[in-house]
Structures are given as C-alpha cells and as structure tokens.
Amino acid sequence: MSEYAFGRPIGKIIHGGDYNPEQWLDRPDILEKDIEYMKQAGVNEATLGVFSWAMYEPREGEFHLEWLHEIMDRLYENGIYTILATPSAARPAWLDSKYPEVMRVDDMGIRRRHGLRHNHCMSSEVYREKVGIINRKLAEEVGDHPGLLAWHISNEFGGECFCDLCKAKFQDFLRKRYNGDIEKLNHEWWATFWSARYSDFSEVEPPYANGQIAIMGHKLDWRRFTTWNYADYTRSEIRAIREGSKKKDVPITTNLMKRFYDIDYRVLAKELDVISWDSYPLMHNDWESYEDTMIEGAFDHAIMRGLRKDKPFLLMESCPGSVNWSEYNKLKRPKVHEQFSLQAVACGSDSVQYFQWRQSRGAWEQFHGAVVSHLGTNDTRIFREVAHTGETLKKIAEVEGSTSRSEAAIIFEWENWWAIDYSGGFSGKTKKYDTTCQKYWEALMRRGIDADIISVNDDFDGYKLILAPMLFSVRPETAEKLKAFVEKGGILLGTYMTGYVNENTLCYEGGFPGAGLKELFGVIAEEIDTLYPSDKNAICMTEDKCFSVRDYCEILRVSDAEVLGKYKDDFYSGTPAITCKKNGQGKAYYQAARILPEELVGFLDMLISDAGIKTRELPSGIEWHRRVGADATYDFYLNLSEQDVTLSGLNGIDLVTGETINGNVTIPGRGNLVVKTV
C-alpha cells in the first residue's frame, strides 16, 4: 500500500484474508503448504489473530505469543504482509469464569453465559483492563514487525448490554447530553405522555423489553449511547496498542458490516485510520436478479467510501464460494467471484480479502467457504478463480491509492433511520428508509452517475445535486446548510416524510417540513396517506408523462413553489405532488409520494439536467465506476449480463491486457474491463 494509509509502500492491491494458523500448529505440513498455496494464489496479506485469545493467554497472566511471531516471520519472508487483529471478539473461558461481569445482560435483564462471540459488556472496566493487557503484549511482541501492515480492532462489532454498569453509564451519557437538566430530557422525550416523567437521571433505565419502550426519544438516545460506548471502547483498545508499540503510525481499523443497524458507523469511523468492511451478498437468490444483487453491493460500497472520502477503503472479508449462515448457502457461479472482487476495487477498495483462507475442521464455521477447502488442494474451481483474481489485481495494481469523485450525493443517516423506524403511524412494513436511499442511488447509477453517500455533517461544496430521501429528522442547522447549498446554485430533492421531527423525535409545529424547510421548498405537507399494497396512484406531469406511486402520498399545501406534477387518483386527485421552488441560484424540488423504483430514473432526469451533470448512456447490464489518481483516470466496466456487450467510443489502455483501446470494445458475458486514460 502507499503511504496514504499504511505508512509503508508495497505497491499493490491487498489480496488475502483471514488466516487461522493456530488451528494447525500441530500440522507443520499444512502450515508449509499454506505458504506455498498463498503464493500460487497471488496472496500478499493475511489477517491473523481475530479469535486467538485462548491461544495467546490460555490461563490468566500466562502468555504464548512466540507462535504468532514465527508465523508473521514466515509470511513476511515469503512476501506476505500481516493485518493483526486484537482478540477481543471472543473471550477465553477463564475470563468469564473469574470475572462474570464481563458477560452481557440481555434486554430482559438476564446475564448471558460463556459462549459464542461478542458476548462482552463494553462498559466493563475489568473487560477493558484484560483486553488492554493482551493488546499491549501483542504490540510489544510484534508492533514493530516489518510485515505488520495494520491493526484490526476486535471483529464485527454488534449487540447491546443492559447490565447495571451500562445503565449507570447510560444515565451519565444523558446527564451530559441534557446538561444535567432532567426537565430538558422530559421535554425532549415528551415524557408527560403516559406519566413517563423522571425526577432524576438515576431513574432512567435502558429500554428493557419488559420496561419503558413507548418513548421514541428514549430509544433513539439509547442507540446514540450504544454507538458512543462502542467508539469509547474502540479508543481504549487503540490506546493500549499505541502504548505497547514502538511504531506509533501503524494504521488501525475494524471491520464494519454493510448497513448494520445498531451502530452509527459515521461516529465509529472517526476513530479509525481506514475504513474496512465485510461483504457477503446472497448471490443467485430467488427474489432478485444477479444484476440487482450486484448493484445493491455497489451501493453498500458507496456507503463505506463515504465514511472517509479522503482515502480508499478495504474489503476486509468476502467469500469466494458459499457462506454457512444463510437459509440457503448457494455457491457463487463461475466468473462471479472475480467480477464481485473487481466491483469492490472499482467502487474504491484497495483490497480483496476473504473469510477464510482454509476451512476449519470443526465448530461453527467448518462449512463456511474458503480459498482452500477440506479437500486441501490447489486444483479446485474456487482456488483457480481466486488465483486468477490475484493475477488480475496485480495487473491493475496502479489504481491503488486513487479515489472516487462525484458531483451528486445522497444523504443517508443512521439517526434518521432510527427515528423513522421508532415513529408511530405510517406502515410498519413499508418505511424502508435504507432501501429507499438505495433505489435513488441505483437510479443515478443507471444514468452513469456514481453518487456519493454523505452525512448532513459533511461538506456540501463540490456537489451540484443532493438527494435527501425521507429526511424525517432534521436539526435547524441542517436546514440552514441545505438552504445555503441551494442558494449557491445546488439542486436539492426533498421527499415525503421530510422534516417531521427534530433530533429527539419531537414533531415540529407549524407544518411539515419543519426547521425552516417549508420556506425552502415552498410547501406544507398537510396530511400523509399510507397506502395498502393493493392501492395505486400516479403523479402526472403531463398527459403523457406519469409516474406510478405506491406506499405514501402527502397532501400538499403550496405557497410559492411551482407545481410540476399532480396526483391522478383518489380524493386528492388533481392536487400538487411534485413542486419546485427557486432559491437564489438553485432549486429545491419536493416529491410528495413514493415513485416506483423502476420509474425513478425518468423522474430524476430533470434534476440531473438542471444540475448540469453529464450522464453516460450505458448498454443494459453494464455497471460503470471511475477512480481518479494523480496522473490517470481509471474506468471500470462490469458486464453483469451473460451476453456479450459492445461499448463504443472508448479510448485508453486496457490495464489487464496492456492493449490500446480506440473505439469499440466487446466485453463477454460476466466479463470486465478496466480502462486507463491519462
């Protein structure tokens, strides 16, 4: 990797993944064969130690790290770097037996027992102390190892604890959030409802399943607290590593998980030097097409890319075959693995990594896919495909360090997601905030616009178009930012369910959208109609241009906006449904109903045109992404169809073949093309 992320250049895209040599310490023949096979597969990295605590410290205070040093030495001697995980994701039995407070309490107030993984209380000072000890030991032993590429904190953070330690910490979190004023909390939680008022912060409990679950602000603050606690815990792990290591500049990450609901990744990302995540799409399922699955994966990559736009992210885990945890564990079909891997790189990843290198003989993940199967040979289909992917990654290695740039963005917020889901009314089945954002992103992609996924706290400068689907929870300062964006020439889209509540889920008075947004859009949503699946409506802009509507329809009161489209049916037939208001040099569009996803492309065309963003006409089945480096631009074309597709008007160098392109190129079914232009 280049210095932008890892402190030392290795000049290549990372190719590797989770390796568990501690499971095979009694089989030196296998450990030797692993090195040989890794080199054959083009592997240049191995992630070690994710679940190794019981091997590192089999009894309290008794450490055995020599085997780790030996493995790292052997890997490095063969050109394979190490990303070293801290082992905190799964505790040894002695720790739980001696210190039961480290085990979580569930939302019924019952303490869990030893077992599985991620069964630890993030608030436990004992747990943090014991993790700190093993982390410092690891840092002292191998923190300055020349093969150490990065540190990997724990593994796939998730879950909650409802113990008394977490309750006390939650209360302290609330004291700070509400400046020690319990009446401020009562107001923001609207706690007079159902006599839920508190006289002191010490009376507030977590939202136990058998306790207070009727206050939306309470549940939202619990999510905020849980996120904060994970971030605070992460800082404690990082501190121990830095204290024990002679080299202080080795970057630190942790592996995130798709659109994981329980943690606001935007908060956690601030603690990390580089973003990494685990991608396990359910390929070849029976409810969507292969193309739909891939495009959804690209959206998830865009979310990760947006957490740290200044540098590439890492694909920390993926599976070249089949997982073992789905209802149906289906194999990736031929050619799919390489296309999936190149998609990650196209979207901004500087790595392709796997769980796992070699299948475990027993326990929970014994049948989870791997590069080396229980057959133990290098002549399997999956091994050959991984090796071929390794060769391809070597050929396109110069894209490493380049980033993605876009003139369009979509706002996606975890706190907004929670606020929508915790709200009453509407429908419990069709809110679907995250997938709604995804569908807008997909619509832009089909016009060749690889939009960024951003936060309301990000800088809006440089964007010409911002889409803010279902921005239900809005702070006044966010409304001011959106207003400034439009006035400076930006094109903004707001939709149904915009600006209904403040950051603590209190409804705005004076009409929706609140916080000043009704002046920006020039409309008030007087009512919202929730539709049954059998209900249908449409928005017509002209007699010949109508968009099908499902799920939600707001009934608007228009003040000074231009009406562009009206409802076709129901008692609100003929009333405004799409509006536009000029503000300064820009425009604020409002879409009052949910348009069918497949029709969003046509609807967004006028916004794209207003924004002056260049589109790309791509043949059906072609997915396109661009990365930009200091001296070159790299265009990735993925043929998601099974048929050959010809692209015209291309110029540059085919990075895989080295051939010059000038005109038409035919990409075979499930084939890929990477074009470099200078």
Image (cartoon, helix red, strand yellow):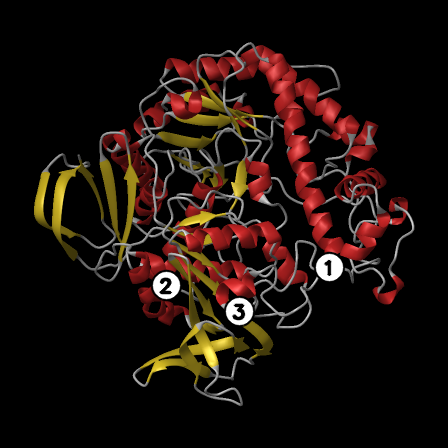
Q: Which residue is mark 1?
A: 216
Q: Of the residues under marks 1 and 2, which one precedes in the sequence?
A: 1
Out of 558 and 100, give the one closest to the viewer: 558
Task: State the separation of the CA atoms marked 1 and 2.
Answer: 37 Å
Residue at 32%, 66% (x, y): give it.
606
| Residue 49 pos. (x, y %) | 56, 26
Q: Which residue is mark 2?
A: 289
| Residue 566 pos. (x, y %) | 43, 81
- Give SS at disc 1: helix
Task: State the separation of the CA atoms marked 3 and 1.
Answer: 20 Å
| Residue 223 pos. (x, y %) | 69, 48
Horizontally, is 40 left or right of 80 in the view? left
- Give SS at disc 2: loop
Out of 108 and 285, give the one closest to the viewer: 108
Vertical arrangement, residue 330 with respect to residue 557, above or below: above
Please tell me the numbered disc located at residue 487.
Answer: none
Q: Is residue 340 visible?
A: yes
Residue at 22%, 33% (x, y): give it.
632
Out of 470 and 303, give the one closest to the viewer: 470
The disc labelled 2 sits on which kind of residue? Answer: Ser
Q: Which residue is mark 3?
A: 496
Quadrant assignment for the N terminus: top left
Vertical arrangement, residue 611 with respect to residue 14, above or below: below
Task: State the separation of the CA atoms marked 2 and 3.
Answer: 28 Å
